[in-house]
Amino acid sequence: MPREITTHVVDGAALNLQIVEDQSGRYVLSGPSGAVAEIVFQKGDPRQECNGVGVRELLAVCIDRMQDYQRGARACPENAECIENMQRALAALKHRTINRIGRKVEGTQSP
């Protein structure tokens, strides 16, 4: 059963965002004319099989997009704050991965 995510909505103006199947890691973004994008997250060890994106990769894309905005006519303090916070999130995830590699649990379900 799909569940809807609404944390991104401001005054009702946003794409609909649904998790199609909780266990699949598949997200569908749709607008009035139907689906516009689908995000499929990696399941399992990407060194064994690459079948989706990771949160780090998705954050890198979002950072790049916001940096494009910040280089142009859309530059503003809020964009700079957003970029800084996403960069912090990405750094935390990188640190987590480095720790997991050091503990030899990267690519597993171990915490």
Image (cartoon, rainbow, N blue to C red):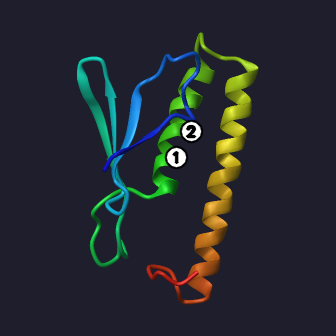
User: Local crowd at mark 1 within 10 Å, few (<14), some, or many (≥20)?
Assistant: some
Q: Is residue 87 above or below residue 64?
A: below
Whole-percent x, y for residue 68 in the image: 54, 26
Task: Pick the residue in front: 57 or 37.
Answer: 37
**Residue found at the far front of this picture:** 1
Q: Is residue 3 above or below residue 16?
A: below
Whole-percent x, y for residue 55 in the image: 49, 55
User: Local crowd at mark 2 within 10 Å, few (<14), some, or many (≥20)?
Assistant: many
**Residue 70 picture quarter:** top right
Q: Which mark is residue 78?
A: none
Q: Quadrant of the C terminus?
A: bottom right
Q: CA distance from mark 2 to mark 1?
A: 5 Å
**Residue 74 picture quarter:** top right
- At label 1, the amino acid type is Ala
Label 2 sits on residue: 63
Q: Is residue 97 left or right of residue 80?
A: left
Label 1 sits on residue: 60
Task: Pick the residue in front: 53 or 6.
Answer: 6
For label 2, the SS is: helix
Q: Residue at x 58, y 16 (%)?
A: 11
Q: Is residue 49 left or right of residue 111?
A: left
Instruction: Check whether the beta carbons of the residues at disc 2 and disc 1 lie within 8 A of each other.
Output: yes
Q: Residue at x 72, y 24 (%)?
A: 78
Whole-percent x, y for residue 31 in the image: 32, 22
Q: Residue at x 47, y 41 (%)?
A: 61
- At label 2, the amino acid type is Ile
Whole-percent x, y for residue 85 in the image: 71, 42
For label 1, the SS is: helix
